């Protein structure tokens, strides 16, 4: 065998000078056109010998390229590759060239360079076999060029189809090489696409032997376009110029959309839409990304991308501040994928959006869905979510039923802070429903009734009365509902004090809500005490006994006021009004309770109301003390100096409290009615003529009338101007 190989190699080398381009001296024309029969016969004999060893190569060549998917990547035959499964077979490595292959290549080259060496059919067969040998020996560029020639000139269409298959196989190997850069993959893909276009126009394409090529062509075309789109995405990703990067992402998205439209039977059509949406979003076209993902969810409901597309659409709508659409997509995600980790957060966002938008029915439906999925797993969080629906209810009866249902279902399962908040809210609601006053005094359930005039025994008939004593009439009858409201307020305060040192009480998202609820509960107890004092006052001039039972007969629990504030002695009501005894102690206790709530006036609405209550308390003491002033002897009667000092001190003190409410309580601005009330009382007390002046101006009884009902703003321009001049 070794001797045969050496003999063939020697013969090939001996023949090369006679056929090569570097012969030392051209032969005459008569001898060049007629080679010696011995050399032709020897060449044919060598071809027969070598082809007997290596084969004649007439038939389909074995394929090396892997089976590609619509995405242009190697896959296992019959099914696309998925993550978590074994990798599909890679491209088969090129086998080592056989020892006789280089000699046969040389013989074929010499043989084909002789015009009269063989018939045309034999020459086409030789070219096809030579192309295979060139690919085997690593001369791929020359082999590809020779295969192109065979596909165009071979009269045997079957062999031409074999050559086309081998040509495409070699191009696919180049295109799917693992060490390809994106640019090289695009270039080789473009060459592959050009060859497919060229082959489709040749007669061989319609031959039966080309049927596998016709079946494979859509996969190859789709794969080439997919890889080109991915290359555009990669170029845009590394591009530093924002405008060029955005343009690259747009080209990527349009390429995927065009691919989707051109290949209806694409096995990864859903991924085409998914990739297009990602490119749109990366390029800043959020609306186009939303529409593309919506098309994906509608057309391919079972796709692996639907879950992420649904969540991405919700987040995109939220970024565009289109809250209703965002809530719809979040809710759709939560319903479809309730067991996913993101489903709970998505449903919580739905509840947050619905609560901010005030959609009561949709919010309650989302809350019920949340409780159905997660109440058993995390009752504390479910309780917090449940309570969000309370604020969206507008009807008091609906709110009451909602709060009662919450306490019945969760009670203390929602945590100590939530229990305090719910108890205080229900107490305030029940308390407000028991009031029957036609014109409450800034939320205090009393009606103001005009009492006797403050008269003076004077001889001059022009001197008329200038102050009308007011009598407050309680309008909150004793009832079980009233008792329960006070008891709930007391329970919420006691529960807070019991858990005050616990970290669970002051959760980050409940600090303000807890403070506001505590202030409401403390204000309710203080108002109950205030109304109790008013109710037990038999007539003006006498403050009721504070030790009497303050509410329904079936309750003997005393009202416990929140008295943490310290009031200087000279600012106490008992000191200013010169009062002593249990009545003075009751007034001071109540004033300290309101001061404790008022101390936090910058934080809660109840603190603003407590500030107004301190002024109301002093005005009530004035009307309760001065039933009829004392009479001093003399031609022009005067009230005794002690009474004069008490009146002026209380009036100035009340006016100062109203001024502080208007100027130092930002939360008062949230309630126009309370703001107007405080401003009006301040102006009236400031403009009220003193009872003890020498000259008494007639017809000033309007100063003691109730404040007019306002529409949230001061409509009297003179009053507004006076307010601007007198309040710092």
Image (spheres, rainbow, N blue to C red):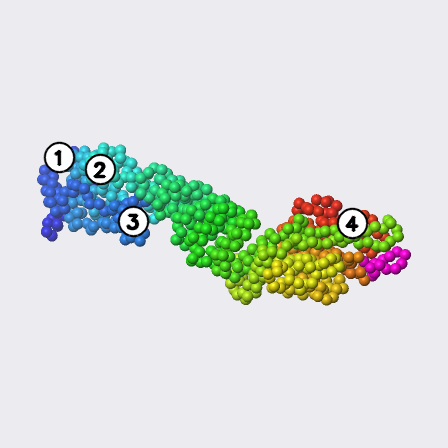
Look at 11% across and 45% down and name the residue there: 52
Q: Position of residue 404 (x, y in %)?
A: 52, 54
Q: Quadrant of residue 628?
A: bottom right
Q: Which residue is mark 4?
A: 701
Magenta portion: prevailing SS class: loop
Mark 3 sits on what residue? 81
Judge depth for marks 3 and 4 and give the one in front. 4
Q: Residues within 10 Å of mark 2 (few under 14, many from 20)?
A: many
- The question of residue 630 being in magenta is answered with yes
Q: Residue at x 29, y 53 (%)?
A: 85
Picture quadrant of residue 490: bottom right
Q: State the residue position of label 1.
A: 34
User: Dot 4, crowdedness within 10 Å: few (<14), some or many (≥20)?
Assistant: some
Q: Are marks 4 and 2 in contact (CB under 8 Å)?
A: no
Q: Dot 3 lies on which element? A: loop
Pick whichever, 340 or 168, lies toward us: 340
Q: Position of residue 170 (x, y in %)?
A: 25, 44
Closer to the N terminus: mark 4 or mark 1? 1
Looking at the image, how many numbered discs can be counted on the residues? 4
Q: Nearer the viewer, residue 106 or 616?
A: 616
């Amino acid at each position: 065998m070794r001797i045969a190989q050496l003999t063939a190699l020697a013969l090939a080398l001996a023949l090369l000078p006679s056929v090569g381009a570097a012969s030392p001296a051209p032969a005459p024309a008569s001898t060049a056109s007629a080679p010696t029969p011995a050399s032709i016969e020897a060449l044919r004999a060598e071809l027969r010998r070598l082809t007997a060893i290596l084969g004649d190569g007439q038939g389909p060549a074995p394929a090396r390229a892997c089976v590609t998917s619509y995405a242009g990547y190697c896959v296992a035959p019959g099914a696309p590759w998925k993550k978590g499964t074994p990798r599909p077979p890679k491209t088969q490595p090129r086998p080592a060239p056989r020892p006789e292959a280089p000699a046969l290549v040389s013989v074929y080259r010499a043989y084909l360079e002789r015009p009269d060496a063989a018939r045309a059919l034999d020459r086409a067969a030789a070219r096809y076999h030579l192309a295979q040998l060139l690919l085997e020996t690593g001369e791929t560029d020359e082999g590809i060029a020779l295969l192109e020639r065979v596909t165009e000139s071979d009269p045997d269409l079957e062999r031409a189809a074999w050559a086309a298959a081998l040509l495409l196989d070699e191009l696919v190997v180049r295109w799917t090489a693992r060490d390809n850069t994106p640019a090289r993959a695009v270039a080789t893909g473009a060459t592959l696409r050009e060859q497919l276009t060229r082959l489709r126009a040749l007669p061989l394409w319609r031959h039966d032997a080309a049927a596998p090529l016709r079946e494979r062509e859509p996969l190859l075309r789709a794969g080439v376009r997919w890889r080109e789109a991915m290359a555009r995405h990669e170029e845009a990703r590394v591009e530093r110029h924002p405008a060029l990067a955005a343009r690259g992402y747009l080209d990527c998205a349009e390429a995927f959309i065009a691919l989707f439209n051109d290949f209806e039977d694409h096995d990864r059509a859903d991924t085409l839409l998914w990739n297009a949406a990602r490119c749109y979003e990366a390029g800043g076209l959020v609306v186009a990304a939303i529409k593309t993902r919506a098309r994906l969810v509608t057309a391919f409901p079972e796709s692996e991308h639907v879950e992420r597309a649904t969540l991405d659409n919700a987040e995109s709508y939220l970024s565009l501040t289109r809250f209703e659409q965002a809530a719809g997509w979040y809710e759709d995600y939560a319903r479809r994928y309730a067991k996913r980790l993101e489903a709970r957060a998505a449903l919580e966002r739905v509840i947050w959006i619905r609560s901010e938008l005030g959609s009561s029915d949709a919010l309650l439906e989302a809350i019920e869905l949340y409780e159905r999925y997660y109440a058993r797993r995390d009752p504390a969080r479910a309780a917090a979510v449940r309570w969000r629906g309370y604020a969206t209810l507008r009807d008091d009866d609906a709110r009451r039923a909602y709060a009662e249902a919450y306490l019945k279902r969760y009670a203390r399962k929602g945590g100590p802070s939530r229990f305090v908040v719910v108890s205080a809210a229900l107490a305030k609601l029940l308390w407000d429903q028991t009031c029957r006053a036609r014109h409450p005094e800034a939320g205090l359930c009393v009606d103001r009734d005009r009492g006797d005039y403050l008269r003076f025994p004077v001889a001059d008939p022009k001197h008329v009365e200038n102050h009308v004593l007011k009598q407050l009439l309680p309008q909150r009858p004793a009832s079980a509902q009233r008792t329960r409201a006070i008891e709930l307020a007391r329970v919420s305060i006691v529960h807070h004090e019991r858990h005050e040192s616990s970290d669970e009480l002051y959760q980050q998202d409940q600090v303000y809500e807890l403070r506001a609820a505590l202030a409401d509960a403390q204000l309710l107890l203080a108002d109950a005490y205030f109304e109790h004092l008013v109710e037990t006052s038999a007539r003006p001039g006498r403050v009721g006994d504070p030790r009497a039972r303050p509410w329904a007969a079936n309750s003997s629990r005393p009202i416990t006021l929140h008295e943490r504030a310290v009031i200087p002695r000279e600012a106490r009501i008992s000191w200013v009004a010169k009062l002593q005894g249990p009545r003075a102690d009751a007034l001071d206790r109540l004033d300290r309770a309101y001061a404790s709530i008022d101390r936090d006036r910058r934080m809660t609405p109840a603190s603003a109301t407590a500030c107004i209550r301190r002024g109301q308390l002093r005005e009530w003491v004035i009307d309760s003390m001065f039933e009829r002033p004392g009479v001093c002897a003399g031609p022009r009667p005067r009230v005794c100096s002690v009474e004069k000092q008490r009146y002026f001190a209380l009036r100035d003190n009340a006016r100062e409290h109203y001024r502080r409410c208007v100027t130092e309580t930002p939360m008062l601005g949230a309630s126009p009615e309370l703001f107007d009330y405080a401003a009006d009382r301040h102006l009236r007390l400031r403009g009220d003529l003193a009872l003890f002046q020498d000259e008494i101006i007639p017809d000033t009884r309007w100063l003691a009338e109730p404040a007019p009902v306002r529409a949230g703003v001061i409509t009297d321009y003179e009053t507004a101007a006076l307010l601007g001049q007198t309040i710092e």
